[in-house]
Each structure stands twice: as C-alpha cells, then as structure tokens.
Image (tube, grey):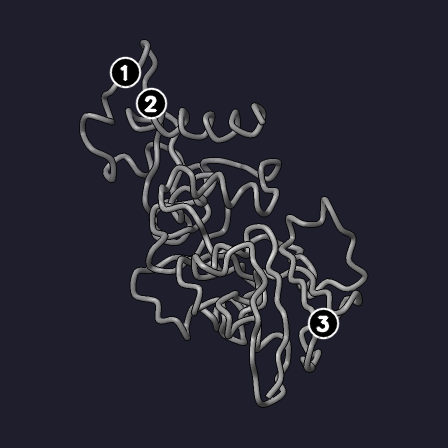
Amino acid sequence: MAIAYFYFHAELNHFLPRHHKQVRISHVFEEKASIKDMIESLGVPHPEVDSINVNGEYVNFSYIVSDDDTINIYPISARSLIIPSISVLPKPLSIIRFVLDIHLGKLAKSLRLLGFDTLYRNDYEDEELAQISYTQARILLTRDKGLLMRSLVTHGYYVRNTNPQQQILEVLQRFDLFELISPFKRCLRCNGLLEPVDKQSIIEQVPEKVRCLRRQATQIDEFQRCQDCDRIYWKGSHYERLQQFIDGVINSQRNE
C-alpha cells in the first residue's frame, strides 16, 4: 500500500468533488501507475493540465508515481505565476480549428459567425469526436470531461459556462483568439466558406420581398453564397442583430 499527495491549482479544482477543492488529496494506491492515469482517476482531464511538479521537479505524463510523492498540478493560467521547465501541453496548433460536442450547438454557431472553422453535428458519437480532433488537428470543445480523457484527444478544453454568450467569450479568452476574429466569412449552417455572388445569378433563390426590398433608398445588391451547401446570405433585418453581437464580443475584450 502506498500514498501520494495531490494538490490541484486554480481552475483545475472545477473538476474535483466539492470536499476536495483547494485541499490536499491523499491518494492511496496499490499498483504503480503513470501520473497521467492517476490525475484522470481523480477527475481531471489531461488536456486541461499544463505542468506537473513532483517533489520539486517538473515531470511529464509518463512519470510513475511513487510512495510519499507530493504532486502539484497546474493549468495554463498558472503561467503568470510559474515558469515550468516541462509542459505536458502539446505544441499549439498552427491553424486554429474546432470540433464541438452535442451540448455546444449555440457556441458552434457563434464561432462560425466570428469566422472560425468549426465542425458540429448533433449526432456525433464520442469516439467520432475524438477521432476527428486527432486526425484533423482540431481543438475539441466539450461539456463532457469523460470525452476529454480519451487518449486520442491531445488538444481539448472543457467549457465551464452554460450560458452561450459567456461560452464564446470564455473560448476566445482561453485560446487568445480576439485578434483572429473575421466575421461573416462562414456558413452558419454547415461551416463552409462564403463567396460573393452576383444577384442576378441567384435572384430566384431569395424571397420576393428581398428582391424588391429597399433599405435607406438603396436596394440590397450584395449577396454571398456558401461554397458547400449553396445557402444564400444577405444583409437583411438579421444583420444588425448579428453585428451587435459581434461588436459586443470585440468590445468585451477592449474593456478588460
């Protein structure tokens, strides 16, 4: 019988039972195991961990836990306080792309609106989500911590907020994406890229009221078409509402 002492820092406490938060966890074990397996057995998904310090030394996920080890586990937010010699997080992706689970449909739409390549379907199985994340080098966003514990998942994040408007701000802040916002370039329905299209070539695909509508004495002549599903977009009554949402997101970062 052996025992190791775990301290989880900052937002990693989110994953622990209430009675374990901000306190030392005495973990009793019989068989030796990797520190990655032990951390996840206590409820913390490995993609949420940035660095691990054992008895004063930083280690990687392959470290085998020994009797009487004192273990401190840090999230990436702790970088403002410590500079670890070893980080267990993988290298950042060169291209930011996402895949989202069934719980995050509204977040998927918001990410697409802001121009981010975002895969979402309400019928993805967990195994499929993990496979897509791995093979396509996409960040997996989820509300299911068990999904993040799958070994295939290297780049992932558990979305804490349940409010969709707070979720988009949380993700933008976590991955420092405010400077990459490029709205109205992706289809909100299928994620395809939009391209300008001549009004006359799609005139039969838009409602009659849009064909004749005049806004401030100017007829609507600018249209975009999704390259994948052929959906048509124009600056209708919905446009101002979407623009207000985008402005709110951008201004939230400026006001911090």
For the point 45% across and 36% down, the residue is 184
Callout 3 secondary element:
loop
Residue at 64% across, 62% down: 73
Element under disc 2 = loop
Horizontal side of 192 relative to 216 (left or right) equals right
Quarter of the picture holding the C terminus = top right
Residue 194 appears in view: no
> Which of the marked residues, 1 or 3, is nearer the chain's N terminus?
3
Left or right for 70, reference 182: right
Q: In this view, does 208 lie to the left or right of 177?
A: left
Mark 2 highlights which residue? 220
Is residue 222 positioned above or below 31 on the image?
A: above
Note whether residue 164 is visible: yes
Q: Residue 238, relative to residue 14: is it above or below?
A: above
Crowd rating for badge 1 (residues with CA inside 10 Å; few <14, some 14–19, many 20+): few
Query: Answer yes or no: do the residues labelled 1 and 3 have beta carbons within 8 Å?
Result: no
Three-letter residue code for mark 3: Asn
Tag of residue 214: 1
Q: Residue at x 47, y 70 (%)?
A: 130
Residue type at numbered disc 1: Arg
Task: Give coordinates of residue 167: x percent, y percent.
Answer: 43, 43
Q: Residue 60 has which mark?
A: 3
Query: Residue 243 at what x, y percent from top left?
Result: 41, 26
The alpha-carbon separation of the residues under discs 1 and 2 comes to: 6 Å
State the CA–CA distance, disc 1 to disc 3: 62 Å
